[in-house]
Image (spheres, rainbow, N blue to C red):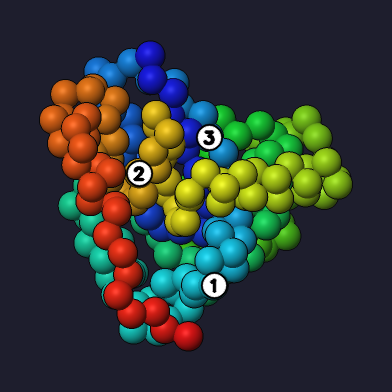
Amino acid sequence: MKRIVFHLDPVSPFVHLAFMRLPEALAGCSVEVEIRPVLFAGLLKALGHKGPAEIEPKRQWTFRHVAWMAQQHGIRLDVPAAHPFNPLPLLRLLWAAGPNRRSCELVLRHVWRGQGADPGDPARLAELSAALAPAEDPSSDVVKTRLRDETDAAIAAGVFGVPSFGCDGRVFWGLDALPMLRAQIEGGDGWLQGPGWDQAGSGQPGIKRG
């Protein structure tokens, strides 16, 4: 059985799509999926990079792209009225409740199947918290530290975006990497099992911007 570490932040629509597609994408594979919520903004800060929703032409393209993909895969996706939003309350709630498939599905539905409502609305957050029944206080220092530590650990493991899937010491990023992840799990892809992986990632940058 292969162990998959699923790094996610509910702020990303690609996380919602990947979460919904994962069971079908890995159907028949012997896997154990460990879900680890991380702060996407923390990854971006560590790498000195802006998120796609912070670059206006890219923001427009991103939401056109995810709307098309959702339609192609038959996945409901309601974009919140304002995006990006602050996902910290949701991430802390996930760690307080225990990040499993049920808790993550409830949180992602709250964001991406909320008919355009504000994910940070206090009344909606209270309803979500009641449904999750967290064992710990989401605002506790213990939970806040866990989220920071997991984000730092993800960065150290080479995670640079969400959704990301860790398997066999390798990181597979994005919804479109699910077939590649499956090939890694099955061990039947000659390129992945040969020198191709290391060779393709060994190129050196030519020009670096200041």
Real-space CA distance between mark 1 and mark 3, rounded to the nearest whole angstrom: 25 Å
User: Is 182 or 82 nearer to us in this picture?
Assistant: 182
Mark 1 Cα within 10 Å, few/some/many (few <14, many 20+)? few
Disc 1 is placed on an element classified as loop
Q: Which residue is mark 2?
A: 172
Mark 3 Cα within 10 Å, few/some/many (few <14, many 20+)? some
The amino acid pointed to by label 3 is Ile
Q: Is residue 176 left or right of residue 77?
A: left
Real-space CA distance between mark 3 and mark 2, rounded to the nearest whole angstrom: 14 Å
Residue 149: percent from left, percent from top: 70, 45
Q: Quadrant of residue 85?
A: bottom right
Disc 3 is placed on an element classified as strand
Relative to 143, does residue 160 appear above or below in the rendering? below
* Disc on the earlier residue, 3 or 2: 3
Q: Which residue is mark 3?
A: 35
Relative to 66, does residue 18 appear above or below in the rendering? above
Q: Is residue 113 left or right of residue 128?
A: left
Q: Nearer the viewer, mark 1 or mark 3?
A: 1
The amino acid pointed to by label 2 is Phe
Find out whether the residues at labels 1 and 3 contact each other: C-beta distance under 8 Å. no
Q: Residue furthest left?
A: 190
Q: Is residue 125 left or right of residue 65?
A: right
Q: Residue at x 38, y 20 (%)?
A: 2
* Disc on the earlier residue, 1 or 2: 1
Disc 2 is placed on an element classified as strand
Q: Residue at x 28, y 19 (%)?
A: 29
Residue 119 appears in the picture as rendered: no
Q: Which residue is mark 1?
A: 48
* Disc on the earlier residue, 1 or 3: 3
Residue 54: percent from left, percent from top: 48, 78
Q: Residue at x 13, y 30 (%)?
A: 190
